[in-house]
Amino acid sequence: MDRVIGGTPRGSTSLCGTCRHAHRIVGLNMQEVTHCNAVSHTPIVRFPVATCSTYNDQRLPSMEAMQSIAWEVRTRNRGQVGFAPGGGREIEIRPPDRGEGANPMPSPTPYQVKP
């Protein structure tokens, strides 16, 4: 009885084609050389890559891009917390700072949330 371990990968597209760390050079007759910039000595990748521990998909926004558009949400405790009367929590939501020349957004008002 023959056993298959790992199986045959489907497709022949390398992960390097969509990786932020890849530097790809394609020649006129479709020869391709790929350098991986994720490691310090930038090796040449000579085969299609199926999995990679440093893969970073360039089709998705980077962490810095997501942080620049993220809203900041802060909460402050006011008084007692829980079912006790007289307490509340103030929530302040502010849009991200877009710098000078950006469309100014109206400043949101703090909301008073009572437990």
Image (cartoon, helix red, strand yellow):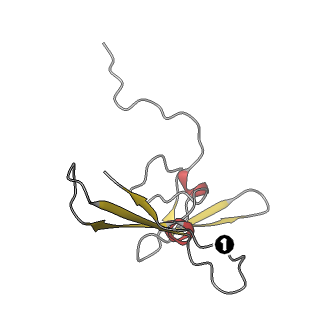
Residue beneath the point at 50% across and 69% down: 67
Q: Quadrant of the N terminus?
A: top left
| Residue 68 screen position, x and y as percent | 55, 72
Residue type at tag 1: Met
Q: Is residue 114 left or right of residue 17?
A: left
Residue beneath the point at 73% across and 85% down: 101
Name the residue that disc number 1 marks: 105
68 versus 54 height, above or below:
below
Residue beneath the point at 24% across and 54% down: 85
| Residue 76 screen position, x and y as percent | 32, 68
Count of picture labels: 1
- Find numbered disc 1 in the image and state the secondary structure of the residue it sits on: loop
The residue sitting at the top extreme is: 1
Q: Is residue 80 left or right of residue 48?
A: left
Quarter assignment of residue 65: bottom right
| Residue 71 screen position, x and y as percent | 51, 66
53 versus 75 height, above or below:
above
Residue beneath the point at 42% across and 29% down: 7
52 versus 102 height, above or below:
above
73 versus 114 height, above or below:
below
Q: Is residue 32 left or right of residue 37?
A: right
The residue sitting at the front extreme is: 86
Quarter assignment of residue 77: bottom left
| Residue 55 screen position, x and y as percent | 46, 58
